[in-house]
Image (cartoon, helix red, strand yellow):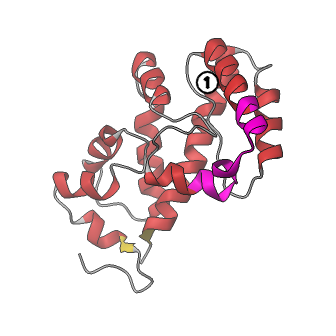
């Protein structure tokens, strides 16, 4: 691939990839879910990064409920000390979640457990530009959502997260 001048991959190069290379280039944008990129490959060529992102989100939103829940469960808890993908590690680091005090870590762990017990998947939030307090406030507020409202919010947050990731990775020509 020639790549765009700013170090990003060019959309035209990505549009020209075979299925395996397309999935290799974009498969990690959606946390542990290369099937999203694989499904979107058939829609090439995309006129813009936004159109590619929309197609990928359409695959997620159109998934049967069981697959959608499994997809959500592939996301890490925020503030976890477990291994996470490089995307998640960078995003959580930017929000200071890699530098929690023991007390903050305990608070995040307890809220994550409560959230998972209530909804069946981890709390998902686009943390870019947010600090620990904002994240905790969002987590506490969303614990009051009903199951369908929270499912929709989790998918909306994934759209934000993956939109950022694609914008960081790809350049429109």
What crowding class fits label 1: few (fewer than 14 Cα within 10 Å), some (14-19), or many (20 or more)?
A: some
| Residue in the foreground of this view, choosing between 89 and 60 | 89
Name the image quarter holding the N terminus: bottom left
Q: Position of residue 86 (x, y in %)?
A: 45, 54
What is the span of residues highlighted in magenta in the rendered image?
91-107
16 over 73 or under it: above or below: below
Q: Residue at x 36, y 38 (%)?
A: 33
Q: Position of residue 116 (x, y in %)?
A: 61, 19
Farthest bottom residue in view = 5
Q: Residue at x 76, y 27 (%)?
A: 142
Q: Position of residue 38 (x, y in %)?
A: 26, 44
| Residue in the foreground of this view, choosing between 36 and 87 | 87
Q: Residue at x 77, y 52 (%)?
A: 131
- The residue pinned by badge 1 equals 151
| Residue in the foreground of this view, choosing between 16 and 161 | 161
Decide if residue 108 is on the left or right side of residue 168.
right
Q: Position of residue 72 (x, y in %)?
A: 50, 29
- Quarter where residue 115 is shown: top right
Q: Residue at x 46, y 52 (%)?
A: 53
| Residue in the foreground of this view, choosing between 130 and 149 | 130
């Amino acid at each position: 691939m020639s790549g765009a001048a700013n170090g990003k991959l060019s959309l035209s190069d990505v549009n020209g990839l075979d299925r395996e290379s397309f999935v290799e280039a974009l498969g990690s944008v959606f946390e542990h879910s290369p099937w999203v990129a694989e499904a979107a490959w058939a829609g090439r060529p995309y006129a813009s990064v936004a159109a590619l992102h929309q197609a990928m989100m359409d695959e997620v939103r159109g998934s049967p409920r069981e697959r959608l829940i499994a997809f959500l469960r592939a996301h890490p808890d925020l503030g976890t000390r477990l291994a996470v993908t490089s995307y998640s590690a960078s995003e959580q680091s930017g929000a200071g979640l890699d530098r929690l005090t023991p007390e903050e870590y305990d608070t995040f762990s307890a809220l994550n457990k409560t959230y998972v017990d209530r909804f069946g998947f981890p709390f998902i939030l686009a943390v870019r530009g947010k600090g620990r307090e904002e994240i905790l406030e969002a987590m506490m507020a969303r614990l009051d959502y009903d199951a369908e409202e929270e499912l929709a919010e989790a998918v909306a947050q994934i759209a934000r997260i993956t939109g950022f990731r694609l914008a960081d990775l790809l350049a429109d020509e």
